[in-house]
Amino acid sequence: MDKNNERECNEDLIRERRKCNFNIEELTNIVDGGKARTARRREIQRLLINDPEFLDEIPQDYMSHEDRYSNELRKSAHLMQKLADQESGHDIHQDIGALTGILKDGNPLMVHLSMFIPAILGQANSEQQEKWLGRSLRNEIIGTYAQTELGHGTFVRGLETRATYDPTVEEFVLHTPTITATKWWPGGLGKTCNYCVVMAQLYTQGRCYGPHPFIVQLRDEETHRSLPGITLGEIGPRLGLNSNDNGFLKFENHRIPRTNMLMKHSQVLKDGTYVKPLHNKLSYGTMMLVRVGIVGACSRSLQYAVTIATRYSAVRHQSEIVPGQPEPQILDYQTQQYKVIPQIASVFALIFSARSLSKIQSSVTAKLKDGNTDLLPELHSLSSGLKALSSSDASWGVEVCRLACGGHGYLASSNLPRTYTGTTCAITYEGENTVLLLQVARYLIKSYRSIGKETGASSVSYLADQTSLASSSSSFSNKALVQAFKLSALSLVAEAEARLQKLCDMGQEFYHAWNYCSVLLLKCAEAHTRYYICEKYEQTVDSLKASEGVKNVLQSLCRLYLIYHITLTHGDFLKCGALTPRNIAVLEGEMCDLLAVLRPQAVSIVDAFDIPDELLGSTLGCWDGNVYQRLYDEALKSPLNKTDVPDAYYKYLLPLMKSSL
Ligand SMILES: CCCCCCCCCCCCCCCCCCCCCCC/C=C/C(=O)SCCNC(=O)CCNC(=O)[C@H](O)C(C)(C)COP(=O)(O)OP(=O)(O)OC[C@H]1O[C@@H](n2cnc3c(N)ncnc32)[C@H](O)[C@@H]1OP(=O)(O)O
Ligand SMILES: Cc1cc2nc3c(=O)[nH]c(=O)nc-3n(C[C@H](O)[C@H](O)[C@H](O)COP(=O)(O)OP(=O)(O)OC[C@H]3O[C@@H](n4cnc5c(N)ncnc54)[C@H](O)[C@@H]3O)c2cc1C
């Protein structure tokens, strides 16, 4: 689609784009993280879009379960080949982002890329990396990350798969002792992978040392048949991601060499002596890495959904605002703006916090190289909180966008259903959100109780600021609103801690008190993480060197985000005195003003996300707004439309209709 050719475009969209009062390319660069990154993303996307190998012969929704898998594996393999042919030395995180949309509904190599390779990088020592990293990067071996079992996903310490060391032959014996110990879920495990990283309970010298990672060959490298002692399969259809082959795995006393235990952090020596790691959660590092990546991935899902919903809302006309006047664009309804525009604001919130988290991760990783694990709990807490809020915000945001598109949003061809199922899975995988938020709460309570002791953990340093509890601000600058989030979080933490203490003082064990307070603890974790996101949003926009137009748009979006979230949880702000009922009423009014200010810019802002039609894959969200023709053309692809009268009519309907004669 030639974006300069207005003649092919829907008139409403032409008018919307003429209202733009900022430099779209400049905003695109901010979204991508710089000009060079925009250029690189576009280069990759051009490479993919112009390649006919990525086209589906028929829409995926009409394919059988097997064909979906096979078709997506074909494209995934082709994609890996293309990426391998590219020059090296670029940031793969950026490349993964650029690939959004090319592979649909999960892909069998995703966990190879996003977890198996990172597990080797983060958990294998240098000799082991020498042996497996190059091979996996060149796709000579394909792996997955097999941790979850039928009986346990969340509670990693409860895993049942055993790796028992046998010093006589220097081997580990992997065994699945019960049905609940069956590995269940790993992406690509069913049919695609020939290797995997398995998390298993390590037993040596008669003692269990907890879950540790092992690299295990699952299939013969020539025939791809599963090896003796290994049972593999696919777990069946899911809510979404059905092009992937999420699998199951059982071991029957399967032996692997000692050197297949990934030994960067802890080791088992030849004689079976266990050497413990610097920190006993270092073996959870792969999960932490992916949680960081998920925040960025969620912002991309939301970009897709808001692009579709905003363009469609500009093209769609329905009902009337002024009696007797022509039907307005649905984007003119304030309620529609309230659905869509806060989701646009949310995209930037997620982008900026993902960047901030990624920086923290790099500095913690650098410190780890020097043997310093002090900031690991801080990273664990931040990555858990941001993974949880980004996945739930994005999932809800995508669903709101679907609802904003009315009936057409329910059609597969809108690409909103698949965007939703591809996002909501992130609420569950890589640590179920409630569980991760309770980890954040644990960190908050611990930090609150150790006020005065210097930990160097900056995300919780505000908990020591007791004076702010007494002072509510009368100013409404963005900074002041961020302070209100801080006050609300601090007050919830103080309340939860006091409630916990009271229960303990009354004789309850801490863990029972904890469970009894866990709804409140969840709120603490959410408020704390929301404060973090708001603070990063405000600081990033405030310090941004940008043209006036772009800065104004981002300031308004940031302010909308702050006020939107205050109104959603206003009880917490009132309870702690950070804001008065009158303040809330004023802010609610201002939110409506902001919707009106941002409304004329909405289409241009989503244009700045710069998602090519071929990747957006939506009848409703295309650049040219030619929605109705596309909907009609897609409907014609239904196999039921191949004949006027389907066979099923003769088989079932005709006999029924004639039976009463
Ligand atoms: C061609 C070119 C190729 C190039 C390739 C290059 C590759 C590089 C690419 C890198 C890309 C990454 C980008 C990713 C992109 C994102 C896309 C997304 C797609 C991802 C697909 C995902 C598929 C899904 C996979 C999975 O789901 S895997 C399974 C995940 N499972 C879980 O997450 C389980 C959750 N449970 C837990 O984590 C733990 O059980 C628990 C944390 C809940 C509790 O643990 P435990 O019981 O052991 O601990 P306690 O509660 O007793 O706590 C003890 C103390 O320890 C602290 N703690 C816990 N965890 C950690 C930690 N990780 N770090 C630090 N500290 C930790 C607790 O807080 C306690 O502390 P305290 O005692 O002080 O209170
Ligand atoms: C699409 C998808 C892909 C996946 N890919 C992989 C993969 O590649 N590799 C892999 O190993 N795994 C994978 N998983 C598994 C995933 O990691 C787990 O499903 C996830 O960690 C949640 O664990 P669970 O299923 O045991 O849920 P459960 O822990 O059983 O959760 C059920 C409910 O119990 C609650 N609950 C559990 N524990 C607590 C607690 N301590 N406090 C309060 N509430 C609690 C939860 O909040 C939830 O409401 C995947 C899952 C999905 C959906």
Image (cartoon, grey):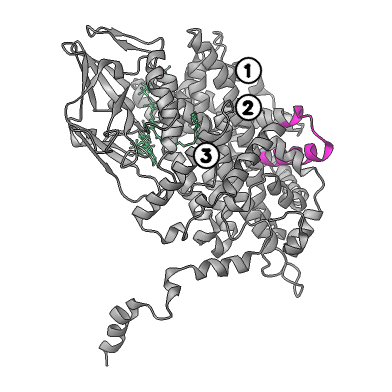
Indicate the position of residue 68 as horizontal and vertical percent values: 40, 53
- Which quadrant of the frame does ligand 1 lie within? top left
What residue does disc 1 label?
Answer: 465
Secondary element at image label 2: helix
Q: Within 10 angstroms of label 2, few (less than 14), some, or many (20 or more) residues?
A: many
Given the image, on which type of amino acid does mark 3 rest? Answer: Lys
What residue does disc 2 label?
Answer: 486
Instruction: State which mark lies toward you, 1 or 3.
Output: 3
Relative to 328, say whether 269 is above or below: above
Residues drawn in magenta: 541-561
What residue does disc 3 label?
Answer: 82
Query: Distance from label 1 to label 3 (Cα)?
Result: 53 Å
Question: Of the residues under marks 2 and 1, which one precedes in the sequence?
Answer: 1
Given the image, on which type of amino acid does mark 1 rest? Answer: Asp
Contact? badges 2 and 1 (CB < 8 Å):
yes
Query: Distance from label 2 to label 3 (Cα)?
Result: 47 Å
Residue under the point 64% across and 40% down: 43
